[in-house]
Image (cartoon, rainbow, N blue to C red):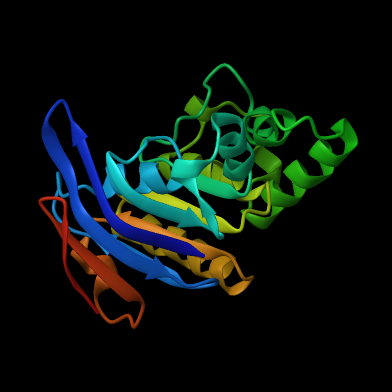
Amino acid sequence: MIQLFHVYKSFGGTPALRDVSFRVRKGEFVFVTGPSGAGKTTLLRIMFGAEKASSGHILINGINLGRIRRKQIALLRRRIGFVFQDFKLLNNKTIFQNVALALEVTGANPSYVRKKTRQALRSLGLIKKEEAYPLQLSGGEQQRVAIARAIVKNPLILLADEPTGNLDPDLTREIMVLFRTIHMKGTTVVVATHNRELLKGTAIRKIYLEKGRVIKED
């Protein structure tokens, strides 16, 4: 589903990723972990097509991101959900509008947009908040909205960048249960985190980054 071969990425001469190679199988759940500045966010953005690798190859569902046009990357990204660390919700739009936007930009039929948006909100316990605005919600609720926006497209792949970084331990557990539920429905899930507590007592595969390099997997 996701394959990286000798991927390098630099910003202004400063290396962010160095010779990164690994594979994520279809339907797998993987943690990418390491300290702040290890390259986790850059790695996810490259997998999403938001950044281009300086060298190396990235294959997503068999498609080489380095060999397709920008328009084709945009189409591929419709099958990838991305949960940002800072949520990136639009504060001047309701919760319903924030989630629906992910479908509206694809040109989907309005009735389909309404149906799928309400399904996503209902699955995350947000249907009663659909007319609220982001700043009226708690941090945990805002994170659930961000997840709803990411899954409303029924993505093949869900990428999450430090999705629990701003949450307390109880909300962190709640969000991780949501990710596991999404994974059990067949979605390939990759979660980047520096929170070692999330990694304890779990058999989920872990890829460790340090200074832009994969230093081990388990």
How many marks on residues?
0
Looking at the image, which residue is at 52% across and 29% down? 134
x%, y% of residue 181?
56, 69
192 lies left or right of 215: right
Q: Quadrant of the C terminus?
A: bottom left
x%, y% of residue 91?
52, 21
Q: Is residue 141 something that shows in the picture?
A: no
Above or below, comparing residue 74 to residue 41 in the picture: above
Above or below, comparing residue 48 to residue 14 in the picture: below
Looking at the image, which residue is at 54% across and 71% down? 26
Looking at the image, which residue is at 60% across and 44% down? 76
Q: Is residue 78 something that shows in the picture?
A: yes
Image quadrant in which you'd find residue 117: top right
103 lies left or right of 164: right
Farthest-out residue, front: 67
x%, y% of residue 56?
31, 50
Image quadrant in which you'd find residue 29: bottom left
Q: Nearer the viewer, residue 66 or 124?
A: 66
x%, y% of residue 120?
69, 50
23 lies left or right of 185: left
Q: Nearer the viewer, residue 59 or 193?
A: 59
Looking at the image, which residue is at 72% across and 33% down? 106
